[in-house]
Image (cartoon, coloured by chain):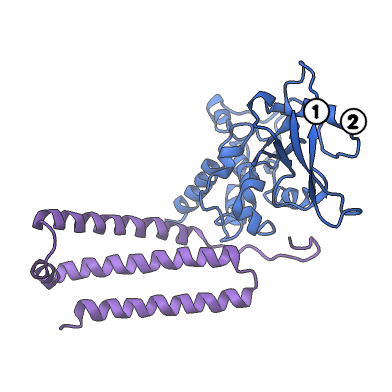
Amino acid sequence: MVSPHVHVPVGAHYGWRDWLVQRVTAIVMLAYTALMIGLALWNGGFDYATWRSIFANGAFRVVSFLFMASLLWHAWVGVRNILMDYVKPAGARLLLECIVVAVLVAYLGWTISVLWGGA
Amino acid sequence: MRFRIYRYDPEKDAKPRLQEYDIALDPHDRMLLDALIRLKATDDSLAFRRSCREGVCGSDAMNINGKNGLACITNLKNLKEPVDLRPLPGLPVIRDLIVDMSQFFKQYHSVRPYLVNDTPPPERERLQSPAAREQLDGLYECILCACCSTACPSFWWNPDKFVGPAGLLQAYRFIADSRDHDVNQRLDNLEDPYRLFRCHTIMNCVDVCPKNLNPTLAIEKIKDLMVKRTV
């Protein structure tokens, strides 16, 4: 409990955008999951050949990228919420948030290299 | 009936303890508060708040067998023995079952829980249509007992920054009031990652509210309005 004599600054005037992003990205992930389940049922499971042919399709790569971007953005909002809930010192929170952003952006780069890096 | 009650007097005790009591009840003792009043007759050192003893004043909110509620409207028949009584969680204990509600009321005051309307008042009162009045149902009934806010993990972690379910329900009570002319400033006041958006829809507030209100729904409506006024 913070002493009532300490002024606690609040009033950052944002928040609804993150809240909405979390919901929209969840819908994107749900749609992609449904698409993958549909493809698995359609093809009778995935073997290496079907997996390659699916990802040879440029549009599917774009959709997959959208899924990964949604996942990472969703994770950013969620993990930051956890840090805001539990990590009290602002400096430590900022440091941890920076680390989370760095990791998530790195994952996005990795996603791009997997999807379009060729092999 | 057997009870196990949280006892703590910060002036005398190094740390809190649980004290066992066995109380011979009268057949007319129906509610938990009746038992507490009977118990106080034998041990007057036990401290708890109570006033109206009919679920209207909100004074005797406490943690009853792990769940927040009002002693005066909790039927003894439905309680498992020994009945575990503790103060509302998350607030500083003044003594035994009495907590310091300052933080709770500070958050309540921060939402400006009164009508703001700068237009000249009519000769009698500001009228509402029955439909506009209906918007306040499920909101105005709140008695500020603090059962909800002290059951909310987000309020436990950030009681100084998160308004909490009770304060947000009251905030929406004035946002929804057709006589209030301050909706935009009210939304500005709440548009904050801590003040409003610490609510993660855990819904403990809905689970414990002794008046069966739904703070989570009110909070969702505030979020909806914020999105609507921006997108």
Name the spot of residue B144 as percent of width and height, x first: 70, 39
Is A47 left or right of A1, judged from the image as shown? left
x and y percentages locating residue A28 in the rendered image: 30, 58
Q: Which mark is residue B23?
A: 1
Chain under label 2? B
Q: Quadrant of the C terminus of chain B?
A: bottom left
The disc placed on residue B46 is none
The residue wearing badge 2 is B42
What amino acid is labelled 1 in the image?
Ile
Against B186, is B158 above or below?
A: below
Chain of the residue displaying label 1: B
Task: Report the chain shown in blue.
Answer: B
Mark 2 or mark 1, which has the lower sequence index? 1
Q: In the rendered image, which quarter is residue B60 located in?
A: top right
Residue B176 shows in the view: no
Separation of marks 2 and 1 at Cα, in angstroms: 9 Å
Please indicate whether residue B141 sits to the left or right of residue A19 in the image: right
Q: Colour of chain A?
A: purple
Q: Do labels 2 and 1 share a chain?
A: yes
Question: What secondary structure is found at the residue carrying circle 1?
Answer: loop
Front residue of this view, candidates B68 and B131: B68
**Helix, strand or loop status at disc 2:** helix
Q: In which quarter of the image is residue A54?
A: bottom left
Any part of residue A96 in sight: yes
